[in-house]
Image (cartoon, coloured by chain):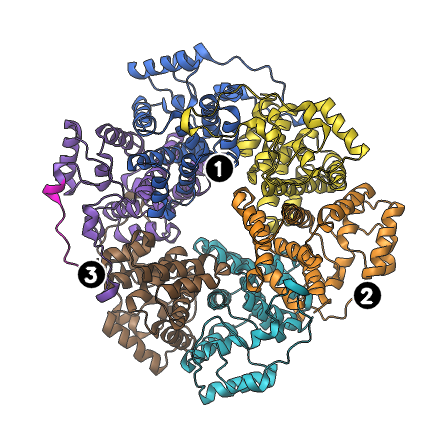
Chain colours: A orange, B yellow, C blue, D purple, E brown, F cyan
């Protein structure tokens, strides 16, 4: 998918100077920097960004130094992009008491369960930035290895069960969250965040969405 | 959750005259009509609907005769409801070539895979309405029993694999869709619909969301 | 498989006036009424019914208005049909304290676990008839959504575990049934019913057995 | 369960002179010979055998030297026992072209998949008797290790898929059997045998049914 | 793989006089005795045994009457064979308090979980020899059928969980072992034995390693 | 487990200056640097290193700047440590044509399948060092996201199948490796490496083995 906005040209990450994967015949033809150019496996004609979305992209550039590829992937149709940004704002970021770190922890653990390259990369980075590098690694690899308090452990256990066997969630699962100090509104928020990444994981996997290469080296 | 809008009072389904499940000691205390009153297991204080959302609810009442409980469940915060309605409009309903029936077929099959009582009920009804009653049943029970053409079979196989093992989706899965006549935009749409219901299934399961009782008897 | 008895001719359901699933190129060539003619994917030469079995078929016609397709499927050899009818009578229907509804609940939940189109259809109908329509739907979709008493919940949990992981059944599983009020004879009956439908589910799936179309609309 | 017939007394296997499992504190209180006395975990009052069933038991004693415990387990009610014996005769043993060995191979492989102690023991013995000891072991452990011809491999692959994921059986699975030389009647028979042992496996697991100790040492 | 040592010639098991599996067209071309000649599916040029390894093989011949095929399989390179023998000695056989029987029980149960023909055969024999024949069968078929004491049941539950879902092992799993009387050193030993057979199971399955035919008939 | 060698004191990694995970009440009491002190959940009395093993530890210190914790974990008994080091040398590192990078790729992908925190950390680092950082991430998250050539893809598919369902490996799996250019010796080596990490993953998970904190930041 060709990047449909002016941002791509302006901010394309400098090709990394990393050496090819393997010398000689075994070297893959693919380098990480390509992921910043060909974002998904789908050829979708570029759309035109509305002023609001252009402003949003500019803000990403300013704050992060890049526009996350997931946004570019939606940008083939401005109305879809807008709806995605709004939904994420309202149903993920506007949690009442969950911290930003906790939201990133849920996102990473759910994405690890679904083995989604894009989302583990982006949200593992989020945990590294807001928490610490090792916590980020544990969320990627096996959250059970982290020595979490009762609250965060209950939160992640719920998110994982909701990901793997949603049909088995029952009142006793909600009760365990309440016993760990969560309100009913928190339960909604945990469910909403976990459910959202179950959606994006599948959108990313369905389209082979590639994470911005810059994520990999941050906050290590 | 108490229904936060005027609609509940106005349109509450008449208690069905169905006899209790089992006579005597075994009868469950629960009847289907309760599902129209206590919509989820969470106690969330009612929010105030914006004029747009109130108008949307009124339109539901007018067209369907009721407001789907999923909308009432989101209505504890108008901005969340608005974002949900918009996202669903843009990323599910605005598919380019998928028919309304095909969208409902994907929704039902994904929800059946996740054994989500709310979503199977609502979208199984959708397939019955737009397709026919038996097709609806087959989507609920086992879509492989339906004698579908190549296009719809490939579409549902993709949606199910994306639901069950998203990490195994690769280029050959997209190629199979292309060979069945789908464009890259269609692949986005199929993925988007399947991913969306993987989200709502989990939100419904996490909160024990109950479908409007009226769905059960429609289009049989 | 050609229907080997006089019943088929006499009682063949009137072709439903349902419109084809999708207009145009997407319409499946198959309609539900065909399921009443071509019952399985196997071409087995018709057998001759014994007087007893003919009487049994006549009684079905009289009481139900049709002969269940599973019986027609066995009828290619009268001795097999007889053995099936007897076994079902003795090991399913002659339960000591399980109610008819409870037997249908086990049958539906086991069949849902095995995603068997034939058996979910036939026994989901049984639950709708003996219990109520919504209970029937919950048994089909996810029995955990039903607000069952301790007895029926324990009964169905046992049946599902026995279906999914029979090797993990141990004394504590039987003890849970006893604590829910079941006798050892009841445990035999629950096991016998669940085991029986694990058999018929597989016979139906192996042969693509199709349920009588009349089931779909009953007791809605 | 107390053995309800005269056979138990007459033919109870001589307690084996095998030493206890482990010397000292670790020795389990249980020896194999107990399995010939306490056949299931259920206490079901003994029934009275009809003359036909008594004759059948006598024939077992005469031919095998013992009455298989599964028959004793059903004998708490003569009508159930009769129905079981008839069904097995008609739907398992009366296969058209499957050899007795092939029937035992299916029974063992299905039972191994369901990890059923009773049925693996009894039918593994069957394969050892009718085939050879090593073939019996391979059916118990992993049938893929046996170097089977196309016919038997296709037969067992079908039986295993029907056991593990019956909902995925489709026309191409039946076609593979046909290409391996099986008729539609054979497909019925293979399905019928595999389905039957999926039933008995669950009945045995649900009741902790114990195989006659004499099986273990035969045909080694 | 051709057997690289003098042992093969010297001690090759006498071809068993077992009749072919099935008479006529269905008979597999393979007999158990072939497993003593063609040990794996890989053609690896024979290596030369060091004096130590030759002595070890001679000791096997003397004590067991044969050299286990797994040793012959490693013998294409003496250093690999030596490392395998040493590792097994140190990390499996040198357990502190686990009995030889308990080690064989873990080996058999892990191998049964992984359905490894070679290892179930060899270690099932080990349990038969050190314990008793029926205990051996139960370890092969379903260890839950054995009436084990708390110690051995906890040990095998841990080994199975470690085999099936190692990522879910947590402190409470270790605590259960401690409550059953195991020391931290015992936990290491149980884990080490279970982990080792998870390795050999995969090496055997990857190479289609065949057990010595002599195992099958021993200690029955 | 207390570190039994002089190395711990000499080379203990400087506590990182990373801030605690979360400020306030949610902060876990655990920091990554603790992983360099308390290596496993087992309290095993320290052993004495032989001169050879001491030399090996010194060489690790010299080359890597630290002794990998897995070696310290085995060091409670020198003979076990020695056997582990030798086995790994012979059966993992002495592969004939597999490159060091390929060995690390197999190790990481197998460990990711088993969600082993220790081994993913150590071998993900190996892939980053020998390959490149992004390849390392893809091996950790989902190897299917990497655009590998036929050889490496076949190699990893085999390793994953051998990890997840070893009982389903058959001649056609080996044939696929041969078609990708691997010799029989290579097949042994791939199997040997994959099998080895299936062992260490389980040893690490069973004991909650913690990776050296220094791994996390290397080669990013």
Query: The C terminus of chain E is located in which quarter?
Result: bottom left
Q: Which mark, residue D167?
A: 1
Give the chain of mark 1.
Answer: D
The image shows residue B212 at horizontal and vertical percentages of 62, 28
In the picture, measured across the screen, residue E35 lies left or right of residue E220, that is right
Q: Residue lying furthest bottom in this view?
A: F51
**Which of C134 and A154 lies nearest the eye of the viewer?**
A154
Distance (Cα) linking label 3 and label 2: 73 Å
The image shows residue D161 at horizontal and vertical percentages of 44, 42
Query: The N terminus of chain E is located in which quarter?
Result: bottom left
Query: Which residues, given as a range, are shown in magenta?
Result: D8-19
Q: Are marks 3 and 1 in contact (CB under 8 Å)?
A: no
Q: Nearer the viewer, mark 3 or mark 2?
A: 3
Give the chain of mark 3.
Answer: D
Q: Report helix, strand or loop for mark 1.
A: helix
- Is residue E95 positioned above or below C104 on the image? below
What residue lies at 47% left-to-right and 54% top-to-bottom?
A: F165
Distance (Cα) linking label 3 and label 1: 45 Å
Both marks 2 and 1 on one chain: no
Q: Which mark, residue A14?
A: 2
Query: Residue E132 lies in what quarter of the image?
Result: bottom left
């Amino acid at each position: 998918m060709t990047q449909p906005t002016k941002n791509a040209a302006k901010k394309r990450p400098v090709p990394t100077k990393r050496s090819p994967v393997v010398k000689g015949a075994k070297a893959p033809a693919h380098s990480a920097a390509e992921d910043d150019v060909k974002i998904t496996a789908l050829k979708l004609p570029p759309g035109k960004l509305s002023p609001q979305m252009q402003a949003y992209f500019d803000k990403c550039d300013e704050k992060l130094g890049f526009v996350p590829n997931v946004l570019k992937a939606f940008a083939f149709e401005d109305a879809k992009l807008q709806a995605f940004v709004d939904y994420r704002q309202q149903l993920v970021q506007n949690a009442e008491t969950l911290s930003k770190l906790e939201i990133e922890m849920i996102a990473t653990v759910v994405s690890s369960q679904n083995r989604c390259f894009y989302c583990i990369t982006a949200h593992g980075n989020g945990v590294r930035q807001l928490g610490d590098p090792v916590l980020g690694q544990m969320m990627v690899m096996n959250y059970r290895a982290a020595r979490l308090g009762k609250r965060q452990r209950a939160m992640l256990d719920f998110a994982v069960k909701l990901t793997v066997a949603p049909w088995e969630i029952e009142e006793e699962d909600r009760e365990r969250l309440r016993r760990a100090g969560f309100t009913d509104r928190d339960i909604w928020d945990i469910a909403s965040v976990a459910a959202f990444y179950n959606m994006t994981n599948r959108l990313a996997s369905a389209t082979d969405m590639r994470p911005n290469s810059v994520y990999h080296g941050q906050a290590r």
